[in-house]
Amino acid sequence: MSYQGVAIFAEWTGKALHPVSLELLSEARRLAEELNTKVLAFFISSPEGKEAAQELIKHGADEVVWASHEKFSSFLDDLFTRILVKMVETERPEILLFPATARGQALAPRVAGFLRLGLTAHCIAFEIDPKERRLVQIRPSFGENIMAKIISLTKPQMATVRPGVFPRAKAEPARQGEIKPFPLEEEELKSAITVLARKERPRPKIDLSQAKIIVAGGRGLGSKEFFDKLFELADLLGAAVGATRPVCHLGWVSEEHMIGVSGQTVSPRLYLGFGISGAIHHLVGVRHPGLIVAVNTDPEAPLMKRAEIAVEGDVRQILPLLIQRIKALKGAENAS
């Protein structure tokens, strides 16, 4: 049997579509146009997800394969895996993309294992080999120092994609598509997992992956106490706080703030980097920024070379002055 279509796993949070689902749709649409094929969305949710299924159509899906049941208000790894495997076996897409979220990273390797497929993790770009209809999967590799191009020898060609890598698909209210209810047997709804309780964990005020302004710091800030000044600056600017991997590993800030291959991918309009050298494993996480401002004592640092505005100087002197100046401007604005 032949394979047809570019499919995504559309993630349901229990309340709404995860924003990364719309990012996957934009890239799936682009790939599908190159391959002259359709876009499918594999969607598992509670019945409340009906409106979200329509949103997937409006944002680029030609078909939404929807498994709906009350049990799907909770994420059950084993149950979701069985359903996705059956969806893949039924629809047989050429390409299957998962978000590199906690759920996506739990499901993708399980599905690949059941179907004996290859899987490329944390991709940041894709190309199509038109002659062989192959998906060229691009991701940082070899200690995150080079960009590797990977081709799967199995189908569907599977990959996970980091949130924030691709732009969100734009809605077309008049767009038409098909929502296909996916049949479920009672036996298929059994799970070895029982949800005893749910507890929301504290999250940053502003979602880093969606932030329009980011102030980020590296080891050049010198200490946790000085890194904390970034939170003061972020409050003044309505920004999110980002960090490099070494800073997180030093315990100056939680890994939720990490930008780069091991953390989040961001596309802010304004990125302020303080004391960040800009190694490739950090810079690949800064996608499509509007304006980069870098402050560092080393003018040859990669981030300084990439920045539109590069300020050569000691961040421990410049950062407090910047905070002081913004406070003065805000005070004058409020007074007027």
Image (tube, rainbow, N blue to C red):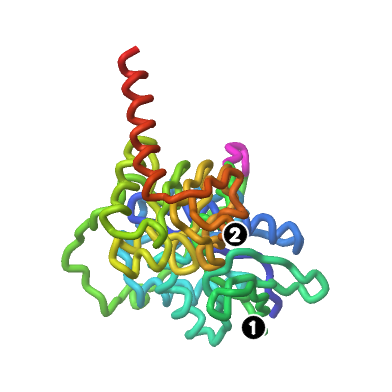
Q: Which mark is residue 300?
A: 2
Local secondary structure at mark 1: loop
Residue range of the region highlighted in magenta in the rendering: 171-175
Q: Which mark is residue 306?
A: none
Identify the residue at horizontal 22%, vertical 73% (top origin).
194
User: What residue is pinned by disc 1?
Assistant: 154
Identify the residue at horizontal 53%, vertical 58% (top origin).
298
Asked whether 171 or 303 is in front, the reply is 303
Residue 290 locus on image (x, y percent) = 58, 43
Main SS of the magenta part reads loop
Residue 315 locus on image (x, y percent) = 41, 50
Is residue 168 positioned above or below 276 on the image?
A: above
Q: Amino acid at mark 1?
A: Thr
Is residue 280 positioned above or below 209 on the image?
A: below
Residue 318 is inside the magenta segment = no
Determine whether, in the image, residue 161 is placed left or right of residue 220.
right
Q: Amino acid at mark 2?
A: Glu
Q: Residue at the far top: name it.
A: 336
Identify the residue at horizontal 35%, vertical 37% (top origin).
323
The mark tally for this picture is 2
